[in-house]
Image (cartoon, rainbow, N blue to C red):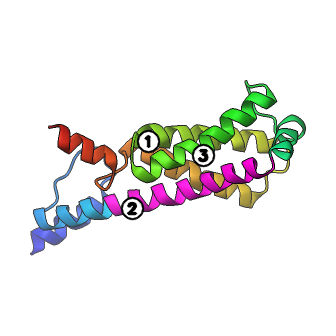
Amino acid sequence: MNTLISRSLGTFTDPGLTPTRLPVPLDVVVSHLQSLALLVARLYVARIFFMSGLTKLHDWSSTLALFHDVYEVPLLPPTLAAYVGTAGELVLPVLLVLGLAGRFAGAGLFVVNLMAALSLMADDFTPVAQAQHTLWGVLALAIALFGAGRWSVDRFIRVGGN
């Protein structure tokens, strides 16, 4: 029992520099919790960006005006930025919810979020907006780095393909 407690505590304080193995029952629980956390992150981030994309579609003339007059998206002309950003906000969340090309979708939404944050900095980027974009960026980056998790189409394809 002391070994189990010692290994468990060591895992919580391990900075992740060296791989550690958990006892099998704890490893199974942690693995499922990781997949649950990735699923929740995927659904949360997907909802945020999909709703934003729908808002842009709802009043396209206002969207174009914002991209021309307010947002300062680096590297892209305003009209192209509006089309690319809206397409990313509508397509990538669907992939994310399904867990299909999850790393790609996470990385794509990270870039969309970064571009939005950079374009907002020219306007009024409040501390609340900064905190929201930071949270969304960290979650999207985590999905890009760790994948969509066990409850995803990516996992189904990988397992089914072997």
Q: Earlier in the sequence, mark 1 or mark 3?
A: 3
Magenta residues span 35-59
Where disc 3 sits, the SS reads helix
Please identify the quarter of the rendering in which residue 68 is found: top right
Q: Please give the residue where the numbered disc 3 appears in the rendered image.
A: 90
Amino acid under label 1? Ala
**Are discs 1 and 2 less than 8 Å apart at CB?**
no
Measure the C-alpha gap from mark 1 to mark 2.
Answer: 14 Å
Is 139 on the left-hand or right-hand side of 161?
right
Check residue 144 in the rendering and tell me which mark sits there, or answer none: 1
Q: Residue at x 39, y 56 (%)?
A: 38
Q: Residue at x 20, y 51 (%)?
A: 20
Is 13 on the left-hand or right-hand side of 44?
left
**Are discs 2 and 3 less than 8 Å apart at CB?**
no
Residue 141 is a magenta residue = no
Q: Residues within 10 Å of mark 1 (few under 14, many from 20)?
A: many
Is 20 on the left-hand or right-hand side of 90?
left
Q: Please give the residue where the numbered disc 2 appears in the rendered image.
A: 37
Q: Position of residue 51 (x, y in %)?
A: 65, 56
Q: Position of residue 120 (x, y in %)?
A: 78, 45
Q: Position of residue 17 (x, y in %)?
A: 30, 44
Q: Residues within 10 Å of mark 3 (few under 14, many from 20)?
A: many
Amino acid under label 3? Leu
Labels 1, 3: front one: 3
